[in-house]
Amino acid sequence: MSEFRARGFLRALYHTAQLWSVDTSPKQLDDAIGAMSRAADLLTAAGPATIGVQTGALYLDDVMLPHASTEFSGLVHRLCDQGVHSITLFPGTTAADLRDLAGLTGGSARDLPADGTALLNERIPVDFENVEMSGLRRSYVDSLDALRTVTNNRSVETDRAGEVVDGLLAGSDADPASSLMLATIHNYDEGTYFHSVNVCLLSLAVGRALGLEHDDLRALGVGALLHDVGRVIIMDPGLGNPNRLSNEEWSEVRRHPQEGAQAILVAGGRDHEVAAAVALDHHRHVSGQGYPDLGDRQPHPFARIVAVADTYDAITSHRPHRAARAPQEALRAILDDSGTVFDPDIAGVFVRMLGVYPPGSVLRLSSGEVVIVVGEGPEGIKALRVRDVAGRPIDEPEAIDVQAASVVAQLPSDDAGVDPASLFETAGHQG
């Protein structure tokens, strides 16, 4: 699982680089450097490792890392801006070199020593021109870029949002199961962006199950993609905050639906009125509760779809104040609130669509093996075996059919030793 080890290092690098741009304590920075060192040791256990960087893509030696390229697309932009095309790590990479690498990535003008244990632009591992990402992954990355533009400019581009939704629609039309696997991607340092794209993919899947036509699906997708832009515009104090919010901070958070709707209306463009209604209504309940309080006005039908997808992704994602929970727990929470918080018809469609074990579910079998669900098949649950009977990770996940009777537990994704979405291409080629 070389991509898994590379992603461990990239995650540590990205997180440490983020700390350079905020007011952080020396201990936090030292702890982050320590995590980088451990990840670098794992990556270089078999010898020097070179991470190649190209706009939109990452490589480990001569192999493209499709999942890492998606998950760390923000890091790719940052490294390219710094003129970094490759990072070569040697066994025993020093903490000092890793600190300099994180500082450079975080915007420091300092360079790395030419004779150090981490080198820049020394090895270009592959002809980047000859390798491309899948269309659905490319659309996912384009969606992330569109949302980063909101952060940088404090304004919304609804037409660009529509263009990337067109790409997501085309990709998920061609491979619906893979789009649901892709909707399990998360990046803790850019949680809002990934959450918004995942909610978009899930909402589009529900819309299809409800029989919506293309134009309505597109409008739904734009609304879902932009449903949380208000959080970015108000610089939501809840973003990345591991502590309980004060009453004043919570009041600020509750303004994000109105702020998001207003920004979308100001932007104009195709589908902007529907998107504004989704942003305004996605925290309003069918019972009349929730926020903002708009009296007896019922939430927009598309906002009801987004509300269910929003809750599912929030529960199954890591948050600064809690760990991710298993998909079954999220589905149970949605059913428990069906008819009060959520539209019962939409909640029912959503739960039936994902099934008992949604794509990306991590299951422990009676044999002791651990598998990741990739879909349903005529012989049972289609899955990839990622741990053997002794609990040891499997280097090359194996496609198997699983009977529901052999499932003894559903686990949080961290227990698999590999992110479900990292098996996106594997699932597509073994199914």
Image (cartoon, rainbow, N blue to C red):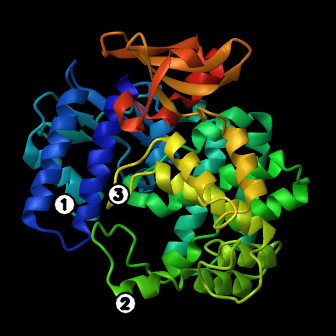
89 with respect to 147 (left or right): left
- Amino acid residing under circle 1: Arg
Identified by mark 2, the residue type is Glu
Mark 3 in CB contact with mark 1 (< 8 angstroms): no
Looking at the rendered image, the disc whose residue lies closer to the viewer, 2 or 1, is: 2
Residue at (21%, 51%) from the top-left corner? 101
Residue at the disc numbered 3: 82
> Where is residue 161 shown, x and y percent of the image?
70, 65
Where the C terminus falls, by quadrant? top right
Q: Earlier in the sequence, mark 3 or mark 2?
A: 3
Number of other residues with Cα within 10 Å of mark 1, as a class: few under 14, some 14 to 19, many 20 or more: few
- Residue assigned mark 1: 110
Secondary structure of residue under mark 3: loop
Q: Secondary structure at mark 2?
A: helix
Q: Quadrant of the N terminus?
A: top left
Identity of the amino acid at label 3? Gln
Q: CA distance from mark 3 to mark 2?
A: 39 Å
Give the x, y percent position of residue 402.
57, 14
Position of residue 7 relative to residue 223, above or below, is above
| Label 2, label 1: how far apart the Cα atoms are | 40 Å
Do the residues under discs 2 and 1 have CB atoms within 8 angstroms? Answer: no
**Picture quadrant where residue 119 is located:** top left
Residue that badge 2 annotates: 248
Q: On the rendered structure, is 288 left or right of 116?
A: right
